[in-house]
Amino acid sequence: MTSSRLRVLIPQDEISRLLGRLAEEVSRDYRDSDPVVIGILKGAFIFMADLVRLLDFPVQVDFVRVASYGAGTRPGGQPRLTLRPHLPLAGRQVLVVEDIVDTGHTTAAVLRYLERQRPASLRLCALLSKPSRRETPVVINYLGTNIPDLFVVGYGLDAAERHRNLPYIAVLGNE
Ligand code: PRP
């Protein structure tokens, strides 16, 4: 697990630039609406922390967690929420924050669950998307950037729970 296996894909200054643009877009749409920002654990924890600190108006934050594929996947193949938001969401402006949309299964399951809580609005902000991997259609209202189908780590994303703490996005291995 040495740094020589990591190739920087999105450096820190590029992440800052993407964050700045996303924060501007989110601010434009949510400044006067007292939104609830909901992060999908664990991967979104760094992106969400950085994003909300660029918003200069009050927001409430909450989290959901989705069981990883395999043991946590229902027989029908749908991911399962293992942590639900504590804040009441009915009638609220809800913004979901996700680090990466890959197949789309995770975000689609989260959005389906949140829709049932009857929010006034429900949108998705994702730092990264791999469109070539999509299996479930997901509308990303605020997108940092598309990336190719590479195994990426850092800035919240992990490989076997490691590398989440990298301040940049890197490709792991020989890709
Ligand atoms: C990763 C990532 C997204 C999800 C995207 O989470 O953080 O939540 O996969 O994949 P999908 O679009 O194919 O569903 P993971 O399940 O690895 O859990 P983690 O966030 O705790 O790392």
Image (cartoon, helix red, strand yellow):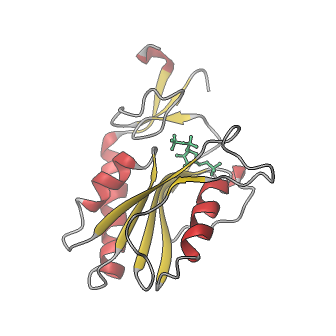
State the residue lying farthest toward the left.
56
- Against 65, residue 34 (above or below) is below
Q: Which image quarter: residue 27?
A: bottom left
At 47% from the left and 23% from the top, the residue drawn is 6
- State which image quarter holds ligand 1: top right
Side (left or right) of 14 relative to 141: left
Is 74 or 154 nearer to us in this picture?
74
- Against 130, residue 94 (above or below) is below
Where's residue 105, x and y in %? Answer: 67, 55
Is any part of residue 165 visible from this angle?
Answer: yes
Side (left or right) of 169 relative to 101: left
- Against 151, residue 144 (above or below) is below
At 63% from the left and 53% from the top, the residue drawn is 80
At 32% from the left and 41% from the top, the residue drawn is 12
Is 134 or 112 nearer to us in this picture?
112
Where's residue 157, x and y in %? Answer: 47, 39
At 30% from the left and 45% from the top, the residue drawn is 13
Where's residue 8, x and y in %? Answer: 44, 31
Where's residue 119, x and y in %? Answer: 48, 81
Is 169 or 44 nearer to us in this picture?
44
- Quarter containing the C terminus: top right
- Against 84, residue 170 (above or below) is above
Is any part of residue 139 visible from this angle?
Answer: no
